[in-house]
Image (spheres, helix red, strand yellow):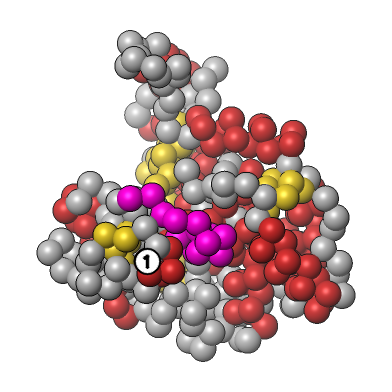
Amino acid sequence: MAGVDGGIMFPADKLRGWTQEVFQKIGVSRDDATLLTDSLIEANLRGVDTHGITRMLCVYVERIRKGVMSAKSKLVVVREKASTALIDCNNSIGQVGAARAMRMAIEKAGQTGVAFTAVTHSNHYGMAAYWAMAALTHGMIGFSSTNAPAAVAPTGGCTAMFGTNPFAIAIPAGRELPVVLDLATTVVARGRIVLHAKQDKPLAPGWAFDHRGIPTTDPHTAMKGLLAPIGGYKGYGIALAVDFLCGVVLTGSNYGTHFPGFLADNMIDPTDVGSVFAAVNVESFMDLPEFTATIDKALQEIKGSTRAEGVKRIYVPGEIEFDMKAERLAKGIPIPEQVVKDFIALGRELAIPFPET
């Protein structure tokens, strides 16, 4: 989980309304601000705070105000076939391009059964699961993936060559909750390191290395070092594959060391991110009711399997996040004190007061 460890609680609706106002104040259209805000708040609700307003709001605002990311959307479909499409985002907000690409994938999959779309010259698109989950209400399996600035060294190296390169898969179910696998190809997202550094909290062992490739639990040292890939050399291989698919092979966007820097550190050059999306129409392979009933049965078997000593519950991917969303809708979203101070300062600067708890 990429959630914060604590903070001041704020109702989701208050944060949503304020965030939308902030984006509109700096030139984002009403519709785009609504979409962008929803993707960030949904990340916070699901406990993925590294991709919510907790980390991304002030970064996005600064990039837009400095002209590094365009507030106005300019999406152009540059290649298209029956089951594929490539969209040039022209440095538009990443979520706007992702929404268009995922919508096209779903529409095309409705006609052809399976569809892949991609975006080029885009930006950070938020939580990967947000886009994969868009397919669920259409009776489809959704997929999304993106590359990112280098933070991971190849096995045996100590030079950052690959990003956290996350991917998400969402699978519909019937009475059970859908399966939503959303993960970075690193043990933790870099945003987790950022949040720990902001709160001066030590990292868990195994999360990161210093610039020489030596393990560290100091978040400030890790910010200048490397992230640990999941599963050692296997995680390195997955990160490479995602980077090549999203950057080199399908989009012609940046990849590896060619990114101009991390979002918060680079306020000069556009990021030029590439992302890939897919939708699989279940009805092309099996009747949807039969599929969801089978998924339900499989999930019940997994969750009902024998537990190890001391384990109270077996989870399936996405279940913890669904539980977290219910809890945060009821109790509020925790915002670390230092981040609250950042929001208050931003609100004063834009004459949009940050809401009280």
Residue labelled with disc 1: 222
Judging depth in this view, the residue of 256 and 246 nearest the camera is: 256
At horizontal 65% and vertical 56% (from top left) the residue drawn is 336
Give residue 66's position: percent from left, percent from top.
63, 86
Looking at the rendered structure, the kind of residue marked 1 is Ala
Residue 196 included in the magenta stretch of the image:
yes
Residue numbers of the magenta segment: 193-205
49 vs 250, left or right, is right
At horizontal 53% and vertical 61% (from top left) the residue drawn is 200
From this viewpoint, is residue 105 visible? yes
At horizontal 33% and vertical 11% (from top left) the residue drawn is 306
280 vs 340, left or right, is left
Give residue 75's position: percent from left, percent from top.
55, 72
**Above or below, 71 relative to 291:** below
Give residue 172's position: percent from left, percent from top.
48, 30
Instruction: Kindly give the residue lying farthest to the left in the view shown.
Output: 156
Crowd class of label 1 (few under 14; some 14 to 19; many from 20; radius 10 Å): many
159 vs 224, left or right, is left
